[in-house]
């Protein structure tokens, strides 16, 4: 665990936003399920994406690096799809801390009908899997959860069915089924039993599936009809920039001089492009061009933010609220308690250490803004988004900020600290215990 002393006195410059983690997971899976060879451009192998890459390779996909995309931040890769007749029983897939990897690959393993053991971090297996357990029980699929170590072993064949899924839980369960059900011999339906949150993540899944020749019928987000016996076809696919990561720099730009985020497409299907609406609502005036967004220093004002469709934006937006005039209220964010950390508790606790006026609610936050924070020692909670949010808060800290567990960023954005320095930040690694 690394401890860094950081400061970001006047954020300024251009930053190449890394490729979308959400789209990268989906493209790797679809390419791995396709017949033939796909070329994926602009893939950055964070810890989470590496987990999905290795998972698909365990099933039998072949992945070859074929050069850098623009610079050393991302790669072009060739993916040769799985030959289903060669898949073996007794496979082990280490999902590390990636909820997407675990929840996407479980249904795929069951579509193949092979025994697969999924392992990962203790925190990962504390996140709920009850939706899948109910399907296992309904369909007679064998599964075992180890008591002494975080793991799940599944054995059985997923059958075409009508799957009833609550809309208030993670959309990852729905996406996992959307990858697997087209491979089955007959048609299936997914029925959403409560209003669907995180619709944009389902849109991303359906969009990537369509690029690989898989058709999903979306019936007003209340039901999804999936035709069986479909075939994934290889294609070439460019991964676009990640709005959830760009959000940290857009917020930082409001605290300094100006920041231009390259590789962001305003026409994206990513739900986290809602960050543009949020910062506009709070007083910012972003300049939007073709594949870039520029933000300049600006006074900002508190508002109410509904996080139901964009939970990953909350850490960055909480920092903005803490340094805006007036009151910011974040609502419908209860699912953040089931992420890499309890993010409501984590961001409330750590911003509070810096002197922010922030109160934690059961499903949200209330923040009274101020002009500056104090600085001091904070902890990342081993959560990449908490570490990055705290880092950008240093732009408005009177004293240096020391972040314990700063290497949590490797989960999604390994180049974060390099970009932080290129935008005017200063970092010093502390090699002693704090």
Image: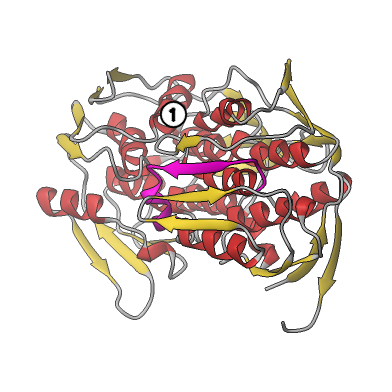
Rendering colour mode: secondary structure
- Viewed as shown, does residue 49 lie left or right of 129? right
The residue at 61%/31% (across/down) is 282
Residue 37 seen by the camera: no
Give left or right: position of 179 versus 427.
left
Percent coordinates x, y for residue 324 in the rendering? 65, 42
Depicted 268 relative to depicted 259: above or below: above
Circle 1 crowding by C-alpha within 10 Å: few under 14, some 14–19, many from 20: some
Q: Which residues are magenta?
A: 323-339
Q: Visible in this render: residue 173?
A: yes
Is residue 355 shown above or below 271?
Answer: below
Q: Verify whether residue 337 appears in magenta.
A: yes
Q: Nearer the viewer, residue 349 or 203?
A: 349
Answer whether residue 54 is magenta in the image: no
* Nearer the observer, 181 or 434: 434
Q: Position of residue 413 (x, y in %)?
A: 67, 49
Residue drawn at (29%, 56%) of the image: 129
Residue that appears at 35% across and 19% down: 215
Q: Position of residue 278 (x, y in %)?
A: 57, 30
Q: Nearer the viewer, residue 309 or 21?
A: 309
Query: Residue lying furthest front in this view?
Result: 326
Res 408 → quadrant: bottom right
Is 52 on the left-hand or right-hand side of 4? left
Q: Quarter holding the C terminus?
A: bottom right
Residue at 41%, 53% (x, y): give it.
Answer: 102
Quarter of the picture containing the N terminus is bottom right
Where's residue 364, x and y in %?
A: 42, 49
The residue at which mark 1 appears reads as 200
**In what element is the residue under mark 1?**
helix
């Amino acid at each position: 665990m690394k401890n860094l002393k950081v400061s970001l006195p006047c954020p300024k410059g251009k930053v190449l936003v890394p490729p979308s983690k959400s789209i990268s997971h989906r493209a790797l899976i679809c390419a791995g399920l396709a017949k033939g060879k796909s070329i994926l451009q602009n893939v950055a192998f964070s810890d989470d994406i590496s987990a999905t890459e290795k998972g698909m390779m365990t099933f039998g996909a072949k992945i070859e690096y074929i050069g850098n995309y623009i610079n050393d931040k991302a790669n072009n890769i060739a993916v040769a799809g799985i030959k289903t007749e060669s898949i073996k029983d007794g496979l082990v897939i280490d999902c590390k801390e990636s909820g997407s990897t675990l929840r996407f690959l479980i249904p795929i393993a069951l579509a193949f009908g092979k025994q697969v053991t999924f392992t990962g971090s203790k925190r990962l297996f504390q996140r709920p899997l009850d939706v899948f357990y109910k399907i296992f029980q309904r369909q007679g699929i064998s599964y075992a959860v180890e008591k002494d170590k975080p793991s799940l072993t599944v054995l059985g064949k997923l059958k075409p069915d009508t799957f009833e899924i609550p809309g208030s839980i993670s959309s990852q369960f729905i996406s996992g089924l959307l990858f697997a059900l087209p491979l089955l011999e007959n048609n299936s339906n997914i029925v959403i039993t409560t209003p669907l949150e995180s619709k944009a993540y389902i849109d991303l899944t359906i969009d990537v599936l369509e690029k690989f020749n898989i058709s999903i019928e979306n019936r007003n987000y209340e039901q999804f009809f999936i035709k069986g016996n479909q075939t994934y076809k290889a294609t070439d696919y460019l991964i676009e920039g990640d709005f959830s990561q760009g959000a940290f720099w857009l917020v930082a730009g409001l605290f300094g001089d100006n920041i231009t985020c390259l590789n962001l497409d305003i026409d994206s299907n990513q739900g986290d492009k809602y960050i543009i609406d949020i910062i506009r609502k709070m007083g910012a005036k972003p300049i939007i061009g073709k594949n870039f967004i520029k933000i300049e220093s600006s006074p900002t004002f508190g508002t109410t933010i509904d996080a139901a469709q964009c939970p990953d934006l909350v850490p960055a937006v909480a920092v903005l609220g803490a340094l805006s005039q007036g009151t910011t209220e974040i609502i419908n964010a209860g699912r953040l308690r089931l992420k890499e950390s309890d993010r409501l508790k984590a961001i409330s606790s750590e911003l509070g250490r810096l002197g922010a006026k922030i109160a934690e609610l059961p499903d949200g936050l209330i923040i009274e803004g101020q002009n500056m924070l104090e600085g001091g020692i904070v902890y990342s909670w081993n959560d990449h988004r908490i570490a990055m949010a705290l880092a950008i808060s240093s732009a408005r800290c009177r004293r240096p900020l020391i972040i314990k567990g700063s290497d949590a960023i490797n989960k999604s954005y390994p180049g974060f600290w390099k970009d932080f320095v290129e935008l005017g930040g200063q970092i010093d690694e502390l090699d002693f215990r704090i």
